[in-house]
Image (cartoon, coloured by chain):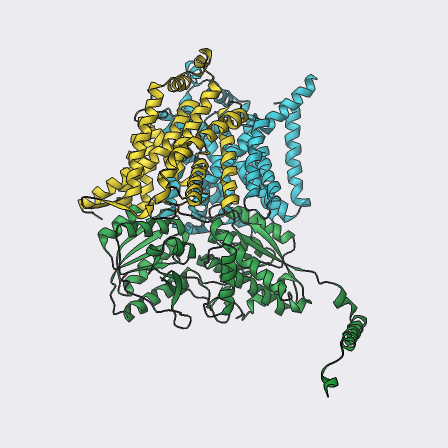
Chain colours: A cyan, B yellow, C green
Amino acid sequence: MKRSELLFLVALLAVLALVPLLASNLVINFLVTALIVALAALGWNILGGLAGQISFGHAAFFGTGAYVTELLQLRFGMNAWAAAVAGIAAGALMGLAIGAAVFRARLRGSYFALVTLAFAEVLRILTNALDFTGGASGLLLKLQPGAAHFQFDQRSVFAWIGIACVGGVLLLTRHIMHSRFGAQLAAVLENEDAARALGVDIFATKLRAITLSAAITAAAGVFYVQYFLYLDANIGYGTWISIEALLAAIIGGVGTMAGPLIGALALHGLGELTRGFAGSITGIDLVIFGLLLVAAIAFAPAGIVGAWKRYVGGRRNA
Amino acid sequence: MTYPPEIVAEAVVGGLLTGSVYALVALGLTLVYGVLHIINFAHGALLTCAMFAVWALVTFTGISPYTAIIPLAVVFFAVGYVLQRYLIGPASHGDDSNILLVTLGLSIAIENALLATFHADTRTLEGDFGFQVVEIGPMLISRPKLIGFAASLIVAGLLWLLLKRTDTGRAIRAVAKEKLGARLMGIEVGHIFGITFGLGCACLAVAACLLMPSFYVNPRVGNAFVLVAFTIVVLGGMGSIPGALLGGLFIGVVESLGGLLLGDSLGQLGIFIIFILVLLFRPTGLFGARA
Amino acid sequence: MTSNLTLPAVSRRTLLGASAAAATLGFPAILRAEPAPVKLGIIQPITGALAQDGDLGRFGATTAIDEINAAGGIKSLGGAKIEMIFADAKSNPEAATQEVERLQSEGVSAIVGGFASPICLAASQAASRYNLAYVVDVGVTDAIITRGLTNTFRFAPGLGIVTKTALANLVALNNAAGKPAKTVVLVHEDGLFGSGLAKLMQTELPKAGFEILETIPHPTPARDMSNVALRIRSLNPDLVIPSSYYGEFVLLARTMQQQHIRPKGIYSVLNGAASNFRFVKEFPEAANGVMDCNHWADPRKPATAALRKKAEAAGKAWAYNIPLNYSCVKLVADALERAGSADREKVVAALAASNFSGHIMPYGETKFVNGQNMGAQPVNLQVQGGDIKVIFPDAFADAHAMFPWKG
């Protein structure tokens, strides 16, 4: 990875870190919401971008992280930070379990995508029906601001923690991309059969990818719960987060390091922009949003990062 | 909770009837997947669009929804062709994940355009189609559902004939099997893609006409059918017409019996668990091509 | 003596002109400057899954604001008009939170709305950071008012009160008819309000002497309700108690009519269709006789009929969301009047001390205890002859209950 790209990333994170100091709560809330999606998308990207296994059911990991952390605090009085770690671990376990079943059966492509969706749906239906998970009424964390409870009076603290997490995952992604594991992932992405012929353990590689991917997305779920406090089956395991995660990663540039972060910011920014069009005709703002999404992909098929690289590459060659 | 056999029998019949409409919705999806290899996220929004079209046509011209089948199928075929040929195809530059995004963006735009035009109210067709019943033995079968069942079988049959016996059908199958080879043989792939997508949308138009008498329409109504349509497509084998039909009927019965046994909420689990099991043990589906 | 009674036109004008001039000379600031408007945030889900209800809620709120402004605005603030700042909650709590931040940044003095419980929970919480008054319109989950947030006020009844009242009214209804109903089948949507209701019903109904044959949950949206109808037919209960949203109840009622399933009564609770005029108009036969224990406007107040006329003229289905949001806005306007200020803290204090009775809900005098309006109650309705009538309590009733139903 080029030095200039690393510099750009550090600069971006620094700018983001300055936002809570300078901007209003409105912007900070926007930032936190975008960071939660960015974290989920970064997780998705490990599996979908680096390994090429497109998942439609990352909600299965987001929700697991969210539910486990909230249940441990509500039902067992566990400390919020310990519960957060447990939530991430649970998410990783869920990834391992689903991965083991699905990759053993050699599911790929659209079949893989749809089976992940099915798993997420099963979890959604179950958590909605079971009393232990709060059933349809959901779970509500007690509002008690304080570092010990992983809740903060100031929204800016959430933002900084989010930026730190995202920064950490970005560095992790970069490290992976340059590591042996990253090479294995790339091999799986390019041509699975050739990779197998070369001796890459496809099953183990994919399993590691999905476990890591699940852990990161589960962290996003934990973060969501600590910020918004209320959780139900549709919030945790609903399709909205699966779609937002993959949308952000693809719009940003699937398989790139910073793509998911940039995509999440762009997507949410676009949402805020189009909201301004909401006039007397209900829904017009969302029509514009949908059309702009189509246009974005039409003009930047490799995502924002891809378009940037093409632009920079073009200028360099000129 | 045990039920007397007549109730179970009626649940099975009900499941078959409902499943036949699911099959029709899945037919369009399986065709599009089998040929274009894309998962069409806009399928639900297009179904909603078709249902609004039925509602508008019936409400403003007074024709029966069954008379509307042919004109609407033609209109939606054209809409589908244009969408694929001049919007989805070019915008996605042939990349799979981009097609996902394009169809996703389209679905958001379509759903909210319908919201802007028709508002959020839930509407139904006037007239008493929805209430007519046919007595078969001890069972009271809904007439529109019976018609839907028959029509689904006919449409599936026609589609199958089209694919097997006509030149266009042969071209479609060629493109599905081997895109590059087909292009080298002179088949215009973009045109075939358009025709396939158009056929998929035409199926949705027919499904809408058959569904409206016993259902309702609002800007979100299509979403409820998409997930189950995907399940059926995978179950039946992507690209298989008989697979979509039999898969639809099967899922309809599973949903019905699952609902009887576990309640309609938990009964939905049955559908997804079957889905997962089929994928884990027989991923190409019941009738799909061997991997 | 006529000269005393009728002033010549010229003098009258001069007199008026003179007094006006005198007033201008004496009180220039008040007469010339138009007082700054009070900003009121209205948040409703007008896109997404809840758009149908959100649209009705918005209509109720905007109508109230227009009426208040036409009548001279907030008098204690010098006739300041209410300026609505509208926010689309997009049917999800994250969007609602962002919108509350936006409303806050635009300087609203209070927020009204939300509709769905998850939205109300998130929005009221976000507003509490600024001690910004949040008036919940519907949001039935009791968690909304047990969090100890001093800025949150719920005008309508929550699940606890609704279930208790529904049950008590059912018992009274049954007793008055000679106890014809004993067996019950509960049908409920498997989301927050349906499951919450069913759970409470399951513990309380047997205590009141009813036998629950079965509880049937269903998803929203449901593609098909014929199985539910099938099971009802096979169980043959005296009473069916359905708590569902609009679409699912339409499917169920239609199927029950098709299959000639006629229990002695359909006693719904918080049903999305049973007390909605669109349903009654489009399915007269299936709707006839259906009872509902739900939010409803007070039929005795003339303002109710006036609002209904306006709604129908605008093409909106008459359902509880409209009068409820209308009343919530009037509640806030009254608080502003008494506070004499648009300051947030003062508005919260004024709401907490409110005893507003100028609303059109059957609640009597307002009294908030820990954020819940203690006067709030649902009423019993029944579709009779193509109209929705109040059958219970007697104080608000405009028709007698027809139970058991011999339709």
Residue C164 falls in image quadrant: bottom left
Question: In the drawing, does residue A141 fall left or right of residue B249?
Answer: right
Residue C255 on image: x %, y %: 30, 49
Residue B241 on image: x %, y %: 33, 26
The correct choice, above or below, for B14 with respect to C54 in the image is: above
Question: In the drawing, does residue B50 fall left or right of residue B113?
Answer: left
Q: Nearer the viewer, residue C282 or A88?
A: C282
Residue C99 on image: x %, y %: 58, 49
What residue appears at the point 43 percent right and 41 percent down from the top-left corner? Answer: B57
Residue B289 falls in image quadrant: top left
The correct choice, above or below, for C401 with respect to A56 in the image is: below
Hey, which residue is sitting farthest right in the picture? Answer: C25
Q: Nearer the viewer, residue C173 or A60?
A: C173
Question: In the drawing, does residue B74 fall left or right of residue C61?
Answer: left
The magenta segment? C401-406
Q: Nearer the viewer, residue C304 or C34?
A: C304
Question: Is residue C402 rendered magenta in the image?
Answer: yes
**Viewport quadrant of the C terminus of chain A:** top right
Residue B269 falls in image quadrant: top left
Question: Is residue C113 rendered magenta in the image?
Answer: no
